[in-house]
Image (cartoon, rainbow, N blue to C red):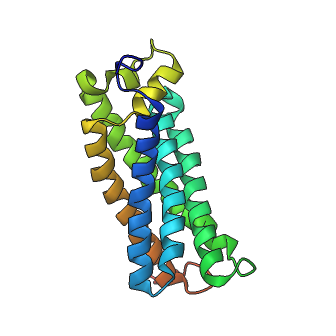
């Protein structure tokens, strides 16, 4: 309490990333069970993806105008690595469809960018709670520390938007899987008008 009076400790920062990883892991395991896939693979890949995406959204919120491209790149990486790992654990590491992982990364980037927009609005609309994240007079590391440090408000936002974004991401990836088949190709039916 005396060495960290504001509660912005490494344990709080780690807690935020672990919360994102936990949300991803639980959704990944549930989806794997529903699809008849390896639940452990879904759990691990969801945790990896959730941790990377949580960190990238937090970094982007503290980055001001550079936030959207940072969020997009980090979320793409999280989605790509999550799908890559899931495929490797389910199908064998020699049978990975990299195009499928690229599409999963792109879908994750789009969903995370929308989540970033919602969270940016929440931060700006509540300066009394989140002012240290958006205060450009503070150093980047101070803003990042505030963005990653968990408290009641950030916990609520992470759980609410994190779960919604993760489920939406999973649904979009499932639609992609059901339309694209095993090859990961998206099939588009064109209707002549």
**Residue occupying image coordinates x 39% and y 71%:** 171
Q: Is residue 160 above or below residue 94?
A: above
**Among the 4 quarters of the image, the one containing residue 16:** top left
Residue occupying the far front of the picture: 2
**From this viewpoint, is residue 190 visible?**
no
The percent position of residue 145, horizontal first and vertical second, equals 46, 28
Image position of 111 (left or right of 1) = right
Image position of 12 (left or right of 77) = left
Residue occupying the far right of the picture: 94
**From this viewpoint, is residue 131 visible?**
yes
The percent position of residue 165, horizontal first and vertical second, equals 37, 57
**Residue occupying image coordinates x 47% and y 41%:** 14
Task: Name the quarter where the N terminus is drawn.
Answer: top left
The percent position of residue 100, horizontal first and vertical second, equals 61, 73
Q: Is residue 16 above or below residue 65?
A: below
Quick one: 8 or 130, which is closer to the camera? 8
**Among the 4 quarters of the image, the one containing residue 193:** bottom left
């Amino acid at each position: 309490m005396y060495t960290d009076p504001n509660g912005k400790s490494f344990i709080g920062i780690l807690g935020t990333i672990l919360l994102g990883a936990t949300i991803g892991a639980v959704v990944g395991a549930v989806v794997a069970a529903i699809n008849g896939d390896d639940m452990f693979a879904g759990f691990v890949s969801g945790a990896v993806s959730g941790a990377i995406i949580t960190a990238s959204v937090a970094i982007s919120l503290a980055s001001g105008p550079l936030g959207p491209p940072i969020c997009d790149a980090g979320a793409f990486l999280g989605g790509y690595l999550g799908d890559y790992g899931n495929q490797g654990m389910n199908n064998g590491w020699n049978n990975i469809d990299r195009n499928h992982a690229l599409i999963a990364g792109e879908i994750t980037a789009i969903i995370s960018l929308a989540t970033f927009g919602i969270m940016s609005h929440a931060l700006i609309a509540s300066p009394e709670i989140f002012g240290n994240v958006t205060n450009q007079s503070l150093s980047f590391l101070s803003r990042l520390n505030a963005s990653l440090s968990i408290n009641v408000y950030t916990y609520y936002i992470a759980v609410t938007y994190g779960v919604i974004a993760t489920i939406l991401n999973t649904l979009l990836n499932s639609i992609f899987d059901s339309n694209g088949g095993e090859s990961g190709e998206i099939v588009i039916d064109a209707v002549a008008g």
